[in-house]
Amino acid sequence: MGLEGKVALVTGAGRGLGRAYALRLARAGADVVINDIRLDAAKEWNEELTAATVMDEVRNFGRRSLGIEADVTKKDQVEAMIDQVLRELGSLDILVNNAGGALTPFDRSQSATMPEEDLRFILDVNLVGTIFCCQAAIRPMKEQRSGKIVNVSSQAGLRGGGNGTLTHYSVAKAGIAQYTRVLAGEVGPWNINVNCVAPGLILTSRAIGQLNRNDQVRRAQAEKSIPLRRMGWPEDVAKVVEFLAGDLSDYVTGQVIPVCGGMVLSPS
């Protein structure tokens, strides 16, 4: 129980990877705050919970949990969320910035033609939201002179773009990786670690439902480019998040860790 007594906030934790991170941290002993723009987000892709809500799933591990609906692209909502965490749970020791995603139509994500509204939305929900949450969390972490921040980039932010699609998402995730590095250098003297995971092709409920990632033909084709010859499950990434949130990573900061089965080894 390496995270016993710690309070963690996971953004975008209503389903998918965020939910996996939250449950992994709860299993390791942390009290976990669940943030999402909709706390019932799992219903959208028929993701099956083991309890009525993700907060109840955390409580079933014997941990405290709090659910907060807030939009991470709104600085005032982020500040209010951090204040509520401190007021109700007493501290904030771990922040996992998971909220985001490639949430606009794929067929209009080309580098040269993507619409302004898509560009601004994707940058906001991924990069700007991460920055706002880090800025708000650093205040109490500096006061207590400790903290673990785990940002979430993507293989899209580390590798070449290939045919030029998902440009705004790739740029946002690359920005998160670089923000992780510069922030780590700034807040290290306060004993705050800032690291980042960069997942590859993960079989989340949305990826299966919206992107048809579990189609056997498409899946077999994609897995040929992955050295471990399989797509990942949310728990594969959650294990690395647990490492970065706990004391095993006390001397690790400013790092971007690909969790992709070796997909990062391929140039595109």
Image (cartoon, grey):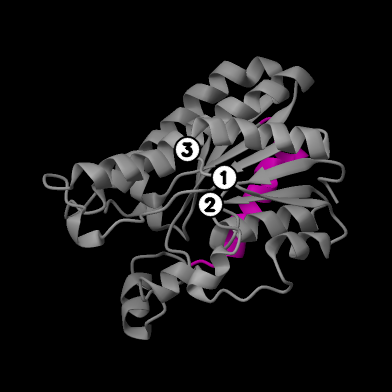
Q: Main structural element of the magenta stretch: helix, strand or loop?
A: helix
Q: Which kind of residue does numbered mark 2 sit on?
A: Ile
> What is the crowding at mark 1: few (fewer than 14 residues within 10 Å), some, or many (at least 20)?
many
Q: Check contact, mark 2 vs mark 3: CB within 8 A.
A: no
Q: Which residue is mark 3?
A: 129
Find numbered disc 1 in the image and state the secondary structure of the residue it sits on. Answer: loop
Residue 195 inside the magenta-drawn segment: no
> x, y percentage for residue 175?
38, 34
Q: Quadrant of the C terminus?
A: bottom left
Residue 39 visible in the displayed image: yes
Tell me where the magenta segment starts and ends, as one range: 232-251
Alpha carbon distance from label 2 to label 3: 12 Å
Pointer 1: what residue?
A: 70
Amino acid type, callout 1: Ala
Query: For the residues marked 1 and 2, what is the alpha-carbon distance in whole angstroms?
Result: 5 Å
Q: Residue at x 31, y 76 (%)?
A: 221
